[in-house]
Image (tube, rainbow, N blue to C red):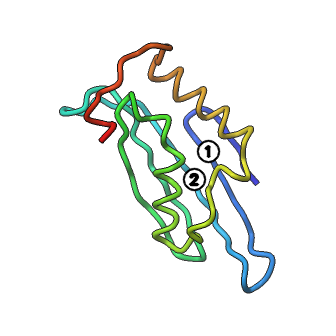
Amino acid sequence: MATFEPGHLHIERHALNKDDYSYNLCIDYEVVQDPKEGKGMLFKMHGSVQDKDLKEEFFLPKDQAFDFARYATHIAQKYGLPRTVVLTGQMHKQYDLMFEDVRHRLDVKPGDPINPAHLE
């Protein structure tokens, strides 16, 4: 199950048996100004993975903010999400809405420059 409202994504999955996995996660996000990287998005994850409490934040500069699902997946994997699972796999519609909201909040336009250092 996934629900989205601007600035907030909630994703939840319940294990079907003892060999399955579960998570209940919220990702809240807001535009912030980082002294080194400039304008970007602060993502705050909280909830649980495999009944382990999770609370972490990560910042992505404007030109990397659309990679939020990869960062969120890696964090969830640290708490027990299987390495073969990608969080966006179950929530395409909500992911698309969040992607669009991030683009709008950061005022990203086609052709905006990318910091080459972020590609390394």
Question: Does 6 sit above or below residue 111?
Answer: below
Crowding around mark 1 (Cα neighbors within 10 Å: few <14, some 14 to 19, many 20+) is: some
Query: What residue is at 50 percent from the left and 35 percent from the top?
Result: 66
Query: x, y (%) of residue 28?
Result: 51, 44
Query: What residue is at 48 percent from the left and 14 percent from the top?
Result: 109
Give the distance between the C-alpha atoms of the residues marked 2 and 1, in whole angstroms.
6 Å
At label 1, which amino acid type do we have? Answer: Leu
Left or right: 46 in relation to 33: right
**Residue 26 got which mark?**
2
Give the residue number, with chain letter if any, for mark 1.
9
- Is the N terminus in the top left, top right, bottom left or bottom right quadrant? bottom right
At label 2, which amino acid type do we have? Answer: Cys
Q: Residue furthest right?
A: 16
- Indicate which disc, 2 or 1, sits on the residue closer to the N terminus: 1
Image quarter for residue 35?
top left
Query: What residue is at 57 percent from the left and 53 percent from the top?
Result: 26
Query: x, y (%) of residue 54?
Result: 48, 66
- Is the C terminus in the top left, top right, bottom left or bottom right quadrant? top left
Left or right: 105 in relation to 86: left
Query: x, y (%) of residue 24?
Result: 63, 63
Left or right: 39 in relation to 20: left
Question: Does 3 sit above or below residue 113?
Answer: below
Query: What residue is at 41 percent from the left and 58 percent from the top?
Result: 56
Secondary element at tag 2: strand
Crowding around mark 2 (Cα neighbors within 10 Å: few <14, some 14 to 19, many 20+) is: many
**Residue 27 got which mark?**
none
Secondary element at tag 1: strand
